Amino acid sequence: MAEESRASDKTSGREIGRPPRLLERVHQAIRARYYSRRTEEAYVHWIRRFIYFNGKRHPEVLGEAEVTAFLNHLAADRKVAAATQNQALSAILFLYREVLGRELAWLDGVQRPTRPPRLPVVLTRGEVERLLAQLTGTHWLIASLLYGAGLRVMECLRLRVKDVDLSYRQILVRDGKGEKDRVTMLPGKLVQPVRGHLERVRLLHARDLKEGYGEAGLPYALARKYPRAGREWCWQYVFPSKNRSADPEDGVIRRHHLYESVPQRAIKQAVRSAGIAKHVSCHALRHSFATHLLESGSDIRTVQELLGHSDVSTTMIYTHVLNKGARGVASPLDRLEQLRAEYALASEAPAQPNTARRCSSRR
């Protein structure tokens, strides 16, 4: 236990015997509650900005007035979105409640914009085909899984070999959003491409083992419970990085999974090349997956389970492209029997020369 404590102090970046600083306490409180790495990064970012906004004063000497001023600054001066302001508020409340042990009074003076409902960007089947036609290799396989299995981009990149079942044609998503596990489909058209991709990854893993590496990072305390499990084939990432790097947690040289910017840049470039005039991201392929399943008659409860939504109301947002609402009725303009297209006639008519002005110029 003493060795583990010394190792923990070393990896946390502080000297033994020195009390942890504020941000170190924030990191410890977040990890003790098993929040995601993204949440940890976001909370630390907003706490740091809150401290700098108040002249680097310690939050213990600050109160409701300073918190209100900071949140109003974000809304009025920085003009951030409502979700961004709510994230900053959550980070500050976590700091005071869980780290400093203080309860803030109700912040009456905070400008709290309501988060407007946003409709997801959905591609047509033809647009998906054009987008995928612009991709090759690993980029094509990742985009195909995002659309064919409804995965989030980080869920796809964090897949391990043991999570892909080629025989049952299914994918087990572990520690997804909200730390929930779920099972989703593996499209039949991707079985052979995934099998060929895994064979290439196996050769890469064998080369790493030969060179004295080949250990994948394990979640939680599995590395202590199974010291050699990280070198096993089943724990390797399906989409490993091209280069090995030092793990920021313990400094061990490992081959991590691809960074999320790799498929993001590839899909962004593919959208330009395909001439798709929509704001398309990796998540738009997941939106398209859900929408096309509902269009083909799949039960909304089934789609909810495949997406991993806790509430079916979240899945209901994809019904906006079906024959409901505005698309379920015909416009009264389309019901007119005789319609004179003024704009079309005016655009097709040849321009008449101004004879009067031409004659006057001759005189």
Image (spheres, rainbow, N blue to C red):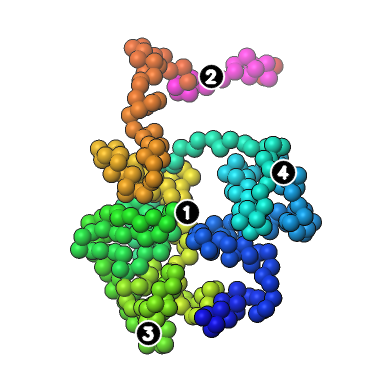
Mark closer to the observer (1, 2): 1
Query: Given the image, on which type of amino acid does mark 1 rest?
Result: Lys
Magenta stretch in the rendered image: 344-361
Q: Label 2: how many residues lie within 10 Å, few (<14), some (14-19) or many (20+)? A: few
**Dot 3 corresponds to which residue?**
209
Decide which of 152, 264 is in the foreground and name it.
152
Residue 85: % across, % down? 62, 45
Query: Given the image, on which type of amino acid does mark 2 rest?
Result: Gln
**Dot 4 corresponds to which residue?**
68
Q: Label 4: how many residues lie within 10 Å, few (<14), some (14-19) or many (20+)? A: some
Q: Is residue 269 above or below residue 106?
A: below
Residue 124: % across, % down? 35, 42
Disc marking residue 352: 2
Gap between marks 1 and 2 measured at Cα: 46 Å
Gap between marks 3 and 4 measured at Cα: 54 Å
The kind of secondary structure element at disc 2 is loop
Query: Given the image, on which type of amino acid does mark 3 rest?
Result: Leu
Point 31% across, 73% down: residue:
234
**Dot 1 corresponds to which residue?**
268
Gap between marks 3 and 2 measured at Cα: 80 Å
Q: On the picture, is 266 further left or further right than 235? A: right
Q: On the picture, is 307 further left or further right than 40? A: left
